[in-house]
Amino acid sequence: MRKERDQRPLLKELHESSHTHFVLDCDTDRIVDVLRQAREVSMMGDYESYLLTSLDAHTLDLSEFQYSQTNITTLRIVSPDSAMVRDAVLEWTMGEEMVGRHITLQPNTLRTEAALMHDAVRLVATALQQMNVRTTNYTYPLRCDTGQTWRHGLGLANFIKTVRLKGLTGSVSVDNSGQRVDYSLDVVELYHGGMRPVGIWTYKTGVNQTQPFTEKLSEIERNIKNKTFIVSTKTGMPYLGWKEPREGRVGNDRFEGFSVDLIQELANQLHFKGFELRLAEGDVHGTLDHNTGKWKNGIMKDVVERRADLGICDLTITFERGQAVDFTVPFLTTGISILFTKPKKPEPELFSFLKPFSFDVWIYMATVFLGVSVFLYMFARVTPNEWTCPHPCNRTPQQLENSFNIANCLWFSIGSLMAQGCDILPKLSPNEWRNPHPCKPQSEELENFFHLKNSLWHNIGSLMQQGSDISPQAVSTRLLAGMWWFFTLIMISSYTANLAAFLTVERMDSPIDSAEDLAKQTKIKYGALQGGSTASFFRDSNFTTYQRMWSFMESSKPTVFTSSNLEGVDRVVKASGNYAFLMESTSIEYVIERNCELTQIGGMLDSKGYGIAMPPNSPYRTAISGVVLKLQEEGKLHILKTRWWKERRGGGACRDDLSKSSSAANELGLANVGGVFVVLMGGMGVACVIAVCEFVWKSRKIAVEERDASTRSVYLSRSRTISEIAKDLDITS
């Protein structure tokens, strides 16, 4: 300590350095004056600690500092409570009175120097006494101005080294080098009742604390009850928001939110005298100046400079912040995630029923359908068992027919494909050939329905799982039809299962699903809160993906960083899928409860917690952390989170949308199945056109036949008339 009387400039400098632990090494008579000056510069608060090096500090009157809640600790070698000290003081005062002198001396004002002198005299006297007992002491005169030594000096020194006694300063003994050993110092601190011992220091073991922890905790809790806490915070729901303006609302009553309720719970549990909410400078968490190592603004600056006792909001516990302040145990667990626009529901496609199979599969199926029908037609033509008599009444027909023409083969295939069947039945034996003219028993013509048209019909019937009455009977056609039915069974089952998913589940594909997707592209911009813990996470990360993301964010123009989380949310909404905001998952959870256009992408990139910040070495940290743990175990923190995340201020707005979407998951609108109606109407239209064409063709054919028949009848009638005339002429002649 400098010798100047005014130490306030030095103390102010120390106060601005944010140091809280000080060793005060000065003359005993100056200690009180220095402490008074420290009080004048606000350095006698809850968080400062002073260690007084003077061994006589306990003799001072420090009562004016008893209620400052500052930790003032000192060391002493003389214990005023010792019976030996009290007896020695009484002996001295009585001795002085016997010779007519009066001294004011109390055990607690006995200076260390006097006690040490007393013990030193006793040590030498005891050594001389022991030496006289053991040796004959002859006194010889000595001159001080000569180099002659006392013949018993070495012996006295050796006796001193063997003496061990209990003095005013404790155990008194010296080692072979003459140094005092085996002594102890009391560690005492100032409290509201004066000075009290809290520990013992020895050379071998160091400090051994003797004050029970429960006693210390009780004292802290007692101080809490007499303290009004200054709470630094920032606005931002759900943690802190302004109530609706109303007359008479002042102070803490102006605010509401999770932080307010949490502080109120702490106040109720620990019985605060009170608390005062104050908005931090700049209404931010705080930005660290890496050049100076100081916090420039925000909650962190208030707490570090001890202008606030507590700092609470969505303040993430990070290494950088933990170096500057103390944190309680986390009251919420969170992690960085991605806020992005919810992908919009795609408009149902007209021909969405084609989605279960790719275009290639549909082409392959059409090709297989035609191929099977052609092969069925060919096999039915080759095998004799598919030819039948067209005249069943004729047992020895001269002509056979085959119903498996190309049209019937196609009809057979499509009938089985559609599970509807058809009327084409391939024959196993010649008896399956039937007479196309049953009324002519001797018909020399037989027919077989397995022409190509019926073969196609058979295949389409099995493919549609409708069947047909074209039933293959020959081994070759049955084998081919069986393989076709197996194929249609698998394909139709796969189509049905996939169709249900395509028509009932709305697929909303997002362009990004994780942070890796963000890092791989440049179209979608992404950013974070300027100077926040999220930005620090990417800046300090050693992971390649996050390093690449940080480089992208730093180089983006215009800047992708925002001054607040609310600004980041607004930017995501306005960007319509071209901007993603990186923020804590708890904040994202709050946002998506109220803005149904937004969603959380992927999981959490890290895991961390929100804590209550306090100045370094705060005496209240243990007590407040204990209450936070208690609130967690009792479920009160979960209740508070549910209240402010999902109930208050528009919470749960998107819950109805979620229930509606889930309940309507199996409802299909016309847009989903409109293509089926189009195909049906198209087929009906084509069938109508074909029917008209067939009618016209048939009508024309009938007209021609009728005209030919009329011409024949006229010709026959004329021939008959001429014949009759000729006959009449012959008769006449």
Image (cartoon, rainbow, N blue to C red):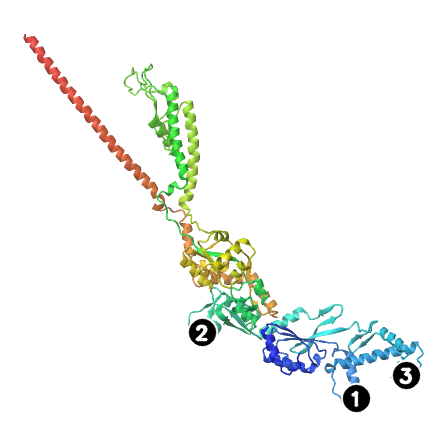
Q: Nearer the viewer, mark 1 or mark 2?
A: 1
Kindly give the residue lying farthest to the bottom in the view shown.
100
Of the numbered discs 1 and 2, the one sitting upstream in the chain is: 1
- Looking at numbered disc 3 in the image, what kind of residue is underneath it? Leu
Q: Position of residue 577 (x, y in %)?
A: 42, 55
Q: Position of residue 628 (x, y in %)?
A: 57, 64
Say what secondary structure mark 3 lies in.
loop
Q: Position of residue 251 (x, y in %)?
A: 48, 74
Of the numbered discs 3 and 1, the one sitting upstream in the chain is: 1
Say what secondary structure mark 1 lies in.
helix
Q: Nearer the viewer, mark 2 or mark 3?
A: 3
Kindly give the residue lying farthest to the top in the view shown.
733
Along the line of sight, the residue nearer the viewer: 662 or 22? 22
Q: Is residue 726 left or right of residue 468?
A: left
Q: Which numbered circle lies on residue 249?
A: 2
**Whether residue 471 is visible:** no
Q: Which numbered circle lies on residue 96?
A: 1
- Looking at numbered disc 2 in the image, what kind of residue is underneath it? Arg
Along the line of sight, the residue nearer the viewer: 482 or 155? 155
Along the line of sight, the residue nearer the viewer: 57 or 276? 57
Q: CA distance from mark 2 to mark 3?
A: 92 Å
The quarter in which the N terminus is drawn is bottom right
When the figure is inspected, residue 439 is found, relative to residue 201, above or below; the finding is above
- Name the residue at 42% across, 33% down: 488
Quadrant in the picture for residue 196: bottom right
